[in-house]
């Protein structure tokens, strides 16, 4: 329905459709703590990639993925399983990055929680892959 008085309809209650101040990851880039910690998480995960490739390049045999002290070796896998661990970690950190950006203006504490949770996950993945490589 057109307005005859020339006024614009109000935007009250509508969802913002973007603009100059809304871009993807703008909140993360502006906050130096979030930017540095998420950057370190991605750098560590990307640094693990050639480490896996070169250390496990020669073997076509099964790799020990999980060892239990009571039962012994209970999960074998190949190189693709180890790369799957890394790809899963990259996916989780990416989702946490977008959630932290989405929640930054609403609840900043959750953004920091997702950020440092991603960093802890990255360190645990680094340790797990290091153990898998050292055992094999």
Image: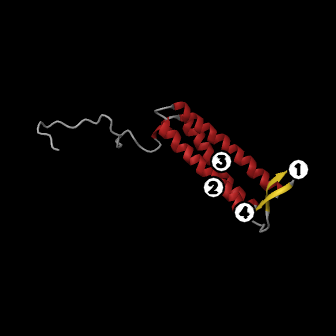
Q: CA distance from mark 4 to mark 3?
A: 19 Å
Q: Which mark is residue 112?
A: none
Tell me if label 2 and label 1 are in contact, CB under 8 Å. Answer: no
The label on residue 70 is 1
Mark found first going from the N terminus, 4 or 1: 1
Q: Nearer the viewer, mark 3 or mark 2?
A: 2
Q: Of marks 4 and 3, which one's residue comes earlier in the chain? A: 3
Q: Quadrant of residue 118?
A: top right
Say which element carries label 2.
helix
Lateral position of residue 28 relative to residue 45, left or right: left
> Residue at label 4?
79
Q: Foreground: 69 or 51? A: 69
The answer for how far apart the CA atoms under marks 2 and 4 are is 12 Å
What is the x, y in percent for residue 107?
50, 31
Q: 89 and 130: which one is in front?
A: 89
Residue 54 in view, yes or no = yes
Residue to which mark 2 is pinned: 87
Q: At which x and y percent is residue 57?
A: 74, 65
Q: Residue furthest bottom?
A: 60
Mark 3 surroundings: few (<14), some (14-19) or many (≥20) residues within 10 A: some
Visible in this render: residue 29?
no
Separation of residues labelled 3 and 2 (CA atoms)? 13 Å
Closer to the chain start, of discs 2 and 4, is 4
Q: Which residue: 66% across, 45% down?
A: 122
């Amino acid at each position: 329905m057109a307005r005859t008085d020339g006024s614009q309809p109000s935007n009250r209650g509508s969802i913002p459709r973007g603009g100059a101040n809304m871009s993807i990851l703008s909140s993360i880039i502006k906050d130096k703590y979030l930017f540095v910690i998420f950057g370190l998480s991605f750098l560590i995960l990307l640094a693990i990639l050639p480490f896996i490739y070169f250390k496990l390049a020669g073997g076509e045999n099964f790799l020990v993925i999980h060892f239990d002290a009571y039962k012994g070796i209970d999960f074998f896998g190949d190189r693709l399983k180890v790369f799957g661990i890394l790809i899963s970690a990259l996916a989780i950190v990416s989702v946490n990055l977008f959630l932290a950006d989405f929640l930054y203006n609403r609840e900043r504490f959750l953004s920091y929680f997702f950020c440092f949770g991603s960093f802890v996950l990255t360190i645990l993945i680094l340790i797990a892959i290091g153990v898998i490589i050292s055992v094999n």
